[in-house]
Image (spheres, rainbow, N blue to C red):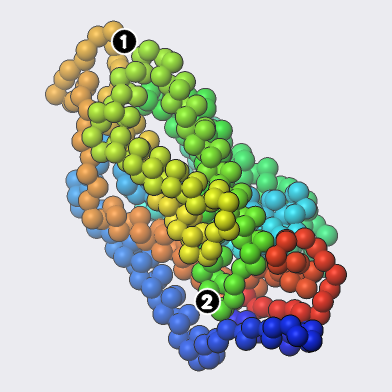
């Protein structure tokens, strides 16, 4: 990750002298910094693997999970990364499918982040389900009545399509196929996120999830979460190279994130509105939104307050949002996403199944009772291991290949964001 600058065009008489280019670290310092970053990511992955091995050898008794709550904190990490992997690809789709030049320059980074996040999510998912040594069986024996079997194809299909898409973007001879590959990735990511939402919607034994709105809700949530992750990584890359993202581009992307966050909040509102319309779900909605302990707290404070309202005030403010404000808003959206998923996934399992409608069930197997769940340390570490893998793949990919957005500053009026005549001022970058 390095940057180089060509000489700026001569300034007009009387005009202020051009600002000096930022001081960049020496090549040796940059190499040391890269290896430090890579070692940090590898350490997180090793810790995640160690946590998975500990749970594998000691059993799920060392976790906070139970027979009722079988998807705990690691699944929150996994689902967030898988949904965000779909959403981050939206940046490339806006460029390739809808022809937006600003986003087209960011398509390679978008594809890399999609692969990294999907890899991190599957890392957690496979190690959390137990018996990862049986992955070959799961990949060769299918029950097509199960949405889980569909997802085997959806995940592997996204890997293959995005890999081909990146090839068409980065190999000049294949560039003419990029629009077709981008369209295929655009369609596939919608199907994949539909499958992720349907995992919950189709569950028979967890009536709290049952809603046809979950698939479209997850698609809209993926827009916000994926773009938030993209903006954080993009800001880090520009800071690493001592560059500043053009104000016009930053304003356009932050506004888009604001629209996505608002749309996601609307879909969540509609989802809970339909749930409240069904009398049989009033108990669950009251539990999740009012008196369920940590779950209402995470929903209202974590998702609504910190993850939606606060970012919206930053992203949709009339004044331009700086780099720090952009990163803060995006980080809040990410944290809000984790809070939403924890309340949705764990809270939905903690609420008991209504076995006999109109009757109260009780047994020694906790029928009719709200179950308790507290995540244990190995679960936190496994989730962080998945994030570490996504971080490591991104860092190495950006170091090895040209994933840095290649903006044509000579044709872009940084103040107004409109194409202008070439002035002779250029900035060459190498990702």
The residue closer to the viewer here, 296 or 139, is 296
What residue is rendered at 38% in x and 42% in y?
305
Label 2 sits on a secondary structure element that is helix
Task: Name the residue furthest top.
Answer: 358
For the residues labelled 1 and 2, the Cα–Cα distance comes to 59 Å
Q: Badge 1: how crowded within 10 Å, few (<14), some, or many (20+)?
A: few
Is 180 drawn above or below residue 267 in the view shown?
Answer: below
Residue holding disc 1: 357
Label 1 sits on a secondary structure element that is loop
Q: Position of residue 133 (x, y in %)?
A: 38, 53
Q: Position of residue 205 (x, y in %)?
A: 36, 25
Numbered badge on residue 143: none
> As drawn, is 357 to the left or to the right of 278?
left
Is 373 drawn above or below residue 181 in the view shown?
Answer: above
The residue closer to the viewer here, 29 or 182, is 29
What residue is rendered at 50% in x and 46% in y?
312
Is 396 drawn above or below residue 247 in the view shown?
Answer: below
Task: Evaluate whether residue 237 shows in this view.
Answer: yes
Q: Quadrant of residue 247?
A: bottom right
**In the rendered view of the protein, which quadrant contains the C terminus?**
bottom right
Is 94 drawn above or below residue 151 in the view shown?
Answer: below
Mark 1 vs mark 2, foreground winner is 2
Residue holding disc 2: 240
Q: Position of residue 59 (x, y in %)?
A: 22, 48
What residue is rendered at 25% in x and 31% in y?
292
Q: Position of residue 338 (x, y in %)?
A: 39, 47
Q: Which circle's residue, 1 or 2, is located before the other in the chain? A: 2
Task: Name the residue furthest front.
Answer: 14
């Amino acid at each position: 990750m390095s940057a180089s600058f060509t000489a700026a065009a001569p300034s007009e008489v009387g005009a202020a002298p051009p600002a000096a280019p930022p001081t960049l670290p020496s090549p040796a310092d940059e190499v040391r910094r890269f290896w430090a970053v890579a070692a940090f990511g590898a350490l997180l992955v090793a810790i995640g693997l160690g946590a998975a091995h500990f749970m594998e050898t000691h059993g799920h008794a060392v976790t906070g999970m139970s027979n009722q709550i079988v998807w705990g904190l690691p699944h929150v990490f996994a689902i967030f990364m898988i949904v965000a992997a779909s959403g981050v690809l939206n940046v490339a789709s806006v460029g390739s499918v809808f022809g937006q030049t600003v986003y087209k320059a960011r398509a390679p980074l978008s594809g890399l982040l999609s692969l990294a996040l999907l890899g991190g999510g599957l890392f957690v998912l496979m190690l959390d389900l137990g018996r990862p040594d049986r992955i070959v069986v799961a990949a060769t024996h299918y029950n097509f009545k199960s949405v889980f079997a569909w997802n085997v194809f959806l995940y592997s299909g996204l890997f293959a399509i995005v890999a081909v898409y990146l090839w068409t973007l980065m190999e000049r001879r294949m560039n003419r196929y990029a629009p077709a590959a981008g369209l295929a990735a655009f369609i596939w990511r919608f199907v994949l996120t539909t499958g992720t939402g349907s995992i919950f919607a189709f569950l028979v034994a967890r009536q709290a999830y049952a809603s046809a709105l979950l698939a479209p809700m997850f698609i809209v949530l993926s827009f916000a979460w994926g773009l938030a992750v993209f903006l954080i990584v993009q800001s880090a890359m520009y800071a690493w190279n001592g560059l500043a993202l053009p104000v016009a581009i930053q304003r356009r992307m932050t506004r888009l994130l604001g629209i996505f966050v608002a749309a996601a909040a609307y879909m969540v509102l509609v989802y809970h509105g339909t749930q409240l319309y069904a009398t049989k779900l009033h108990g669950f909605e009251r539990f999740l939104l009012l008196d369920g302990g940590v779950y209402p707290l995470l929903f209202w404070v974590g998702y609504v307050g910190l993850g939606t309202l606060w970012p919206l005030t930053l992203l949709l403010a009339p004044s331009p949002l700086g780099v720090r404000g952009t990163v803060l808003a995006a980080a809040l959206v990410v944290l809000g996403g984790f809070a939403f998923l924890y309340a949705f996934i764990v809270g939905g399992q903690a609420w008991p199944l209504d076995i006999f409608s109109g009757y109260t069930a009780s047994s020694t197997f906790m029928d009719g009772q709200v179950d308790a769940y507290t995540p244990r340390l190995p679960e936190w570490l496994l989730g962080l291991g998945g994030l570490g893998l996504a971080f490591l793949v991104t860092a190495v990919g950006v170091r090895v290949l040209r994933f840095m957005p290649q903006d044509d500053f000579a044709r872009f009026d940084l103040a107004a964001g409109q194409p202008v005549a070439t002035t002779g001022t250029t900035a060459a970058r190498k990702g």
